[in-house]
């Protein structure tokens, strides 16, 4: 092999490696743009493409979507896990496809107490109060949700005119 061909081969290999690395970086960035990360009980606003007629959530136990005017979608985390979001036009063509990943709250005010296999969650800012959290023991979860529901019912009932 001549010295001249070895000189030209090295820059060509570097150029090929640079092109491959750039494509991997662009593909990774595109995948990241196709994922929406959200916390349980939190909402995220997504601007939809034009002409969206139908919104589909793969698993409504994980996320919920509400379509607003002006092409705005409110996405709410309902349960832990991953699902997908599709936006279709009137002909059924997919205009947008995203993965929705719902995670725990991740705030520093949550305290989890384990009593053997029983689990209880508290929100401790400024005082520790019961918190309704997926994964808590059924008795604790149901008692807390029952109290919350009763309180909400009382609040709605007190707003009536007399």
Image (cartoon, grey):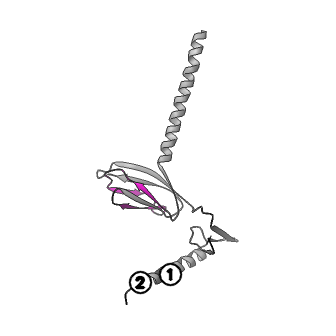
Residue 44, image x, y percentages:
46, 59
Which is nearer the N-term, disc 2 or disc 1? 1
Q: Position of residue 29 (x, y in %)?
A: 50, 42
Percent position of residue 115, x then y: 69, 73
Secondary structure category for the residue under label 1: helix
Residue 58 visible, this orientation? no
- Residue at numbered disc 2: 159
The relative height of residue 50 versus residue 116 in the rendered view (above or below) is above
Q: Which residues are magenta?
A: 43-68
> Residue, x 57% and y 24% (percent of image)?
14
In three-dimensional space, the C-alpha distance between marks 2 and 1, rounded to whole angstroms, equals 13 Å
Q: Which residue in the rendered view is the most extreme toward the top?
A: 2
Say few, some or many: other residues with alpha carbon within 10 Å of mark 1 (under 14 / 14 to 19 / 20 or more).
Answer: few
Q: Quadrant of the C terminus?
A: bottom left
In the picture of the structure, the residue carrying the numbered disc 1 is: 151
Task: Between label 2 and label 1, give the one nearer the viewer.
Answer: 2
Q: Which mark is residue 76?
A: none
Q: Is residue 117 left or right of residue 47?
A: right
Asked whether residue 7 is drawn in magenta, I would say no
Q: Is residue 130 visible?
A: yes
Q: Nearer the viewer, residue 162 or 112?
A: 162
Mark 2 nearby-residue class (10 Å; few <14, some 14–19, many ≥20): few
Residue toward you, 67 or 125? 125
Residue at the limit of the structure toward the bottom, as seen here: 162
The stretch drawn in magenta includes residue 53: yes
């Amino acid at each position: 092999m001549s010295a001249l061909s070895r000189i030209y081969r090295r820059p060509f290999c570097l150029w090929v490696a640079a092109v491959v690395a750039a494509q991997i970086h662009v593909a990774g960035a595109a995948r990241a743009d196709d994922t929406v990360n959200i916390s349980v009980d939190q909402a995220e606003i997504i601007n939809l493409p034009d002409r969206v007629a139908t919104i589909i959530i793969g698993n409504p136990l994980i996320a919920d979507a509400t379509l607003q005017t002006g092409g705005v979608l409110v996405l709410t985390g309902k349960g832990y896990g991953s699902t997908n979001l599709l936006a279709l036009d009137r002909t059924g063509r997919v205009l947008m496809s995203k993965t929705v990943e719902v995670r725990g709250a991740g705030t520093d005010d949550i305290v989890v107490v384990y009593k053997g296999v029983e689990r209880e969650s508290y929100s401790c800012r400024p005082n520790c109060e019961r918190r309704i959290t997926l994964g808590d023991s059924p008795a604790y979860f149901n008692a807390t949700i029952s109290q919350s529901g009763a309180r909400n019912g009382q609040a709605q009932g007190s707003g009536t005119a007399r």
